Image: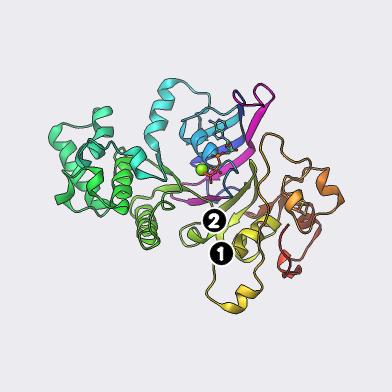
Amino acid sequence: MAEPTGGRPLLQVEGVVKRFPIRRGVLRGAGAVHAVEGVDLAVGRGEVVSLVGESGSGKSTLGKCITGMIRPTAGRIHFDGVEVSGSSRGARGNFRRRVQPVFQDPRSSLDPRWAIERTIREPLDAFRIGNKAARAARVRELMDLVGLPAHLSQRKPSELSGGQQQRVAIAAALALEPDLLVADEPVSALDVSVQAQILNLLADLRQRLGLALLFIAHDLSVIEHISDRVAVMYLGRIVESGTVSEVFTDPRHPYTRALIDAIPRPDPTQRMSRTRLIGEIPSPVNPPSGCRFHPRCPVAIGVCSQDDPQQTTFSSQHRAACHVAAAQTASLSELPHERAWL
Ligand SMILES: Nc1ncnc2c1ncn2[C@@H]1O[C@H](COP(=O)(O)OP(=O)(O)OP(=O)(O)O)[C@@H](O)[C@H]1O
Ligand code: SF4
Ligand SMILES: [Mg+2]
């Protein structure tokens, strides 16, 4: 993926591969799930990069490799110039403080028995940061930062709304003053009205704290307003990346185009020309040959089922891996627009 502008990126992912051996079922011992297949990705300081793609495209697996929850099968991850994918425990300890995950379902990261004050304090306790009074003051500060009223401090998660629970999870993730949050679909379990509030909170935190964000989502509609750059993932690969305006206004990969066309629009004339992505993402156990998108691609040509397309660079930030996009100088927006995407 193209790099952020200006200096060394905070996070640099190079050629990361993650395969899960198949240990159960009829395919046991027969191979592996190719969840992530050679991903390059960079996030700059204070930058918001969104990673989008359908269910099963490998987004969470990549996020887990980045946060150190799982080890990549191959490839390298550098954080602030230090390799963390194969580093010593000491280096990883520092890295773990500086990169924090936020998950889709806040209940999975909140202990139901603990008052929220304890949940937010827990990372400070674990790293023995400050004395009791300093930790209590920091918890109050964090609650204020994420918009949680102080009177909720002794409530249990079950007494809070979904949006409040996600604010608690974000406050706990911020306790150790990380440089990067890896937020894996942090709003998709929430009501639509609450989603905007949490997105606004993340955008606000980025402004106030200079926080970088890797924002994982399965559709493009939620990420347009908070992202600087976007990476579109399909079956373990990044198929297109660029600034948010490049990807939204001049998509080069047919899959990106289908995702953009899937965004609900109020304008009925736009709705008529909308195209649909149909068919399912193939199994990552035996990915299709050539371009992995070819069985569903409406503009595939002969070479697509044989040769894996390389990334073509369209601008300093904008890249896509597609034979047809590489051969075209015009944008895919000029292609016929009425047919379904097979
Ligand atoms: N621990 C695991 N063992 C085996 N296969 C796994 C494991 N974790 C993920 N996978 C498989 O890897 C592929 C990618 O999964 P992943 O959860 O990363 O996708 P995703 O893009 O996050 O999807 P979603 O939008 O549904 O969250 C899927 O086929 C999934 O079944
Ligand atoms: S390489 Fe071929 S199959 Fe793949 S997206 Fe481009 S046109 Fe479609
Ligand atoms: Mg996921």
State the SS at label 1. loop
Quarter of the image for the C terminus: give it: bottom right
Q: Which of the 4 image quarters holds residue 117? A: top left
| Residue drawn at point x = 43 percent, y = 50 percent | 46
Return the residue at label 1.
263
- Whether residues under marks 2 and 1 lie with C-beta atoms below 8 angstroms apart, the answer is yes
Amino acid of disc 2: Asp
Give the colouring mode of the picture: rainbow
Q: Which of 181 and 235 is in front in this view?
A: 235
| Residue drawn at point x = 60 percent, y = 23 percent | 23
Amino acid of disc 1: Ile
Mark 2 and mark 1: Cα distance apart in space: 8 Å
Q: Which of the 4 image quarters holds residue 245? A: bottom right
Q: Is mark 2 within 8 Å of ligand 1?
A: no
Q: How crowded is mark 1: few (under 14 residues within 10 Å), some or many (20 or more)?
A: some
Return the residue at label 2.
219
Q: Is residue 81 left or right of residue 14?
A: left
Question: Can residue 146 be spotted in the picture?
Answer: yes
Q: Residue 65 location, x and y as percent?
A: 52, 33
State the SS at label 2. loop
Q: Which of the 4 image quarters holds residue 149? A: bottom left
Q: Give the range drawn in magenta.
A: 24-52
Q: Looking at this view, name the residue that lies furthest to the right.
A: 302
Q: Which of 161 and 333 is in front in this view?
A: 161
Q: Residue 155 location, x and y as percent?
A: 18, 45
Image height of 286 relative to 43, above or below:
above
